Image (cartoon, coloured by chain):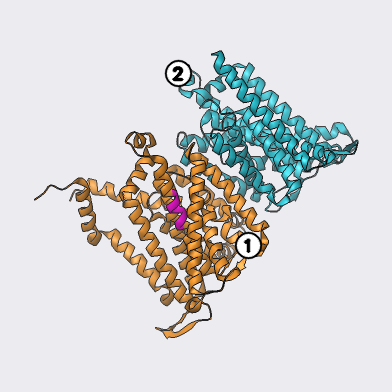
Chain colours: A cyan, B orange
């Protein structure tokens, strides 16, 4: 027993050492100050990707459903937040930290609630009919994506819109010539909080134990007398809410919303969960940070290669560890 | 007389049915219809529509080999289609000249690239689970679009490449009048594409009805059982994927020959082409091959005549704004149709019709 444990520790240590070395590697080509700015940008992007990837990962881990509609839910979150910012324009423009955070919180709550409801409808009406059939799940959630994205075009119009940013979040700090955009720090903060809350729920509550048990062995949980379908709906709603939070935060980050925004970020989310391991929340976090950081470093060093570097990392991971870095129960 | 094996009996029955069943006449009728289109309806719009139905029906059939016969969903099919189109464009225009040899070389190059790429993708993504294939191909297809846009000195960037066809296939070529229409390069190209697609389609039919095709269906229906029976599923799936992708690439080359240009938007766009292909295969029927013809015809005809329908609706019912908005967002309607078909008619039009016919045959024995 202890033998396996040490062996597991040694692999984990190797991975961590490797990660630190990889993290320092870009320093060879980038000045230290730029490196720090890029690192913060990468961490912020990683945290936002974590928000969408964790939903994909949990839903797959528990329900064995690969949700292609997650990108559309992400876009819906961004658009609901966009509308809230539109309604409370004075608060967004007001020169008051309190009002700015108030409108930000209101937008987050509205987006998460609206998209969670959308997720519940999606799970109840569509996804539930195709449990156990991967092919049909992908097809039907792909169909749902078409419908949800078209509905965005119907309700909000087909054009790109500029996302307004609350006044406090604009601009950047300059600490010893290291430029740090304020909003990036907020993104990193949101990511850490969400990760902590998910881990707390999964590790410390009864609900979390049931979910984790479900990832390991769904039949056993059912045999114990738990209503697994209620749990499925709940987890789907939570995943949708996280996607909405991700979408809203990302739209403020990139200063725009557009109907198709979900598809490109869904792709990032897939790369993240393949790297991290489908079904593992920690894996999603690590995968998201890898993707965010490498994207920013490479975009600075070799701009045209930025889009490809994540896919290359994904392929390498698939070759050496096909189940991802942190493979969950299955 | 020696005893017949079950397979021989089935073959014999199929042979006898070939000349008597209604479906054979239907297939022949459809083929004759496509043969006659340039003579009956020589307008640009209808000929263009007809050949696009042929091209997309073949593309959907090649996609069906993956989806319906192997049970693997690929989002990279549009990418292979685009690779074929670009290879033909490279050889005919960008790095060559419009000659017959270069046309063949372009298709050959496309075939080689497709086989190599399909093998690599299979080796990377099939090792874990078949669903990884969907995610990996989606990522690679996205990368292909980015590359086609960014590497503009190679691919022509967003503008793409215009293609001139060699000799008798060129737009300027005119052989004179025959049965009331000009036999132009376009008409010859039409028949070239039609016969090539027919040959490819027959190849696919042969592939799916071969012993290999039956093993693939066994793997699709129950992978564990196929493994237990001793079949190396990985090898069979790889062969099927490579075959399907190879055909998609060749069809992409044909498409480029017809439309006369390639750019990332028209030839590579995952969403546009994959969306169409998925809608077509699901509406027509997965695992039937013929479903592609029904799906492609339905979707392309609807898309072509939808603007007319919109005008009609505006003239007839000027007040119904909601209806107009809905018609403008035709993709919304197709999306809803797609979901409904997946839920209620998972076998699509052809599959449902086949079920209905075989059920009636059982009720009324001969």
Viewer-proximal residue, B232 or A92?
A: B232
Residue occupying the point 38% across, 71% down: B35
Q: Total of numbered circles in the picture?
A: 2
* Residue A326 visible: yes
Residue occupying the point 78% across, 35% down: A104
The answer to whether residue B236 is left or right of residue B74 is: left
Magenta highlight on residue B318: no
Residue occupying the point 63% across, 32% down: A284
The answer to whether residue A194 is left or right of residue B68 is: right
Residue farthest left in this picture: B1
* Disc marking residue A223: 2
Asked if A323 appears above or below B163 in the picture, the reply is above
Viewer-proximal residue, A17 or B119?
A: A17
How much space separates mark 2 and mark 1, taking CA atoms? 58 Å
Asked if A153 appears above or below B301 in the picture, the reply is above
Indicate the quadrant where residue A132 lies. top left
Residue B240 at x, y = what percent? 41, 49
Q: Secondary structure at mark 1?
A: helix
For label 1, the residue is: B155
Q: Secondary structure at mark 2?
A: helix
Viewer-proximal residue, A40 or B292?
A: A40
Q: Are marks 2 and 1 on the same chain?
A: no
Residue B71 at x, y = what percent? 43, 43
The answer to whether residue A73 is left or right of residue B281 is: right
Q: Residues within 10 Å of mark 1 (few under 14, many from 20)?
A: many
Residue A40 at x, y = what percent? 78, 36
Viewer-proximal residue, B239 or A66?
A: B239
Q: Main secondary structure of the magenta part?
A: helix
* Magenta residue span: B241-247
Please, which chain is the residue tagged with disc 2 on?
A
């Amino acid at each position: 027993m202890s033998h396996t444990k040490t062996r597991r520790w040694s692999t984990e240590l190797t991975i961590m050492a490797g990660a630190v070395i990889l993290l320092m590697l870009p320093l060879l080509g980038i000045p230290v100050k730029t490196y720090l700015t890029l690192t913060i940008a990468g961490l912020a992007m990683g945290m936002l990707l974590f928000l969408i990837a964790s939903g994909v990962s949990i839903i797959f881990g528990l329900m064995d459903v690969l949700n292609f509609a997650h990108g559309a839910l992400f876009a819906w979150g961004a658009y609901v937040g966009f509308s809230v910012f539109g309604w409370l324009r004075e608060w967004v423009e007001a020169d008051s930290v309190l009002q700015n955070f108030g409108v930000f919180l209101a937008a987050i709550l509205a987006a998460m609630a609206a998209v969670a409801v959308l997720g519940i409808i999606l799970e109840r009406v569509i996804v539930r009919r195709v449990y156990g059939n991967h092919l049909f799940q992908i097809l039907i959630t792909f169909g749902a994506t078409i419908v949800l994205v078209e509905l965005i075009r119907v309700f909000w119009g087909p054009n790109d819109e500029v996302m307004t940013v609350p006044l406090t979040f604009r601009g950047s700090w300059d600490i010893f010539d290291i430029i740090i955009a304020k909003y990036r720090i907020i993104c990193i903060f949101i990511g850490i909080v969400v990760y902590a809350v998910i881990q707390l729920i999964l590790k410390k509550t009864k609900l979390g134990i049931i979910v984790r048990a479900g990832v390991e062995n769904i039949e056993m949980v059912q045999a114990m007398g738990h209503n697994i379908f209620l749990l499925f709906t709940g987890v789907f709603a939570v995943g949708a809410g996280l996607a909405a939070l991700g979408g809203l935060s990302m739209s403020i980050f990139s200063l725009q919303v557009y109907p198709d925004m979900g598809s490109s970020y869904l792709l990032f989310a897939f790369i993240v969960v393949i790297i991290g391991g489908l079904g593992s929340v920690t894996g999603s976090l690590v995968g998201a940070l890898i993707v965010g950081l490498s994207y920013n470093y490479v975009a600075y060093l070799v701009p045209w290669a930025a889009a490809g570097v994540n896919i290359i990392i994904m392929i390498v991971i698939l070759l050496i560890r096909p189940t991802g870095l942190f493979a969950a129960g299955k | 007389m020696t005893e017949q094996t079950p397979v021989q009996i089935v073959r014999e029955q199929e042979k006898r049915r070939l000349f008597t069943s209604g479906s054979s006449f239907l297939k022949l009728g459809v083929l004759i219809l496509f043969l006659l289109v340039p003579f009956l309806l020589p307008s640009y719009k209808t000929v263009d529509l007809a050949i696009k139905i042929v091209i997309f029906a073949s593309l959907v059939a090649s996609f069906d080999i993956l989806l319906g016969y192997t049970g693997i969903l690929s989002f990279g099919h549009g990418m292979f289609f685009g690779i074929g189109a670009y290879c033909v464009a490279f050889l005919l225009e960008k790095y060559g000249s419009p000659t017959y040899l270069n046309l063949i070389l372009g298709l050959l190059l496309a075939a080689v690239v497709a086989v190599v790429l399909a093998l690599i993708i299979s080796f990377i993504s099939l090792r874990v689970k078949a669903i990884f294939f969907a995610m990996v191909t989606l990522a690679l297809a996205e990368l292909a679009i980015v590359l086609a846009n960014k590497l503009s000195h190679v691919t022509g960037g967003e503008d793409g490449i215009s293609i001139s066809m060699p000799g008798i296939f060129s737009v300027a070529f005119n052989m004179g009048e025959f049965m009331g229409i000009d036999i132009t390069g376009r008409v010859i190209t039409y028949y070239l594409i039609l016969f090539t697609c027919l040959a490819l389609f027959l190849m696919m039919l042969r592939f799916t009805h071969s012993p290999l095709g039956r093993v693939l269906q066994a793997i699709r229906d129950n992978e564990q059982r196929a493994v237990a029976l001793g079949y190396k599923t990985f090898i069979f799936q790889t062969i099927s994927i490579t075959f399907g992708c190879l055909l998609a690439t060749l069809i992409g080359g044909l498409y480029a020959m017809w439309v006369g240009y390639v750019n990332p938007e028209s030839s590579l766009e995952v969403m546009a082409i994959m969306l169409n292909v998925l809608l077509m295969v699901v509406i027509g029927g997965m695992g039937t091959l013929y479903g592609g013809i029904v799906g492609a015809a339905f979707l392309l005809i609807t898309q072509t005549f939808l603007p007319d329908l919109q005008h009609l609706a505006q003239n007839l019912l000027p007040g119904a704004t909601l209806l107009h908005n809905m018609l403008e967002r035709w993709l919304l309607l197709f999306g809803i149709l797609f979901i409904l078909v997946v839920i209620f008619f998972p076998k699509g039009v052809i599959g449902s019709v086949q079920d209905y016919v075989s059920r009636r045959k059982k009720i009324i024995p001969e």
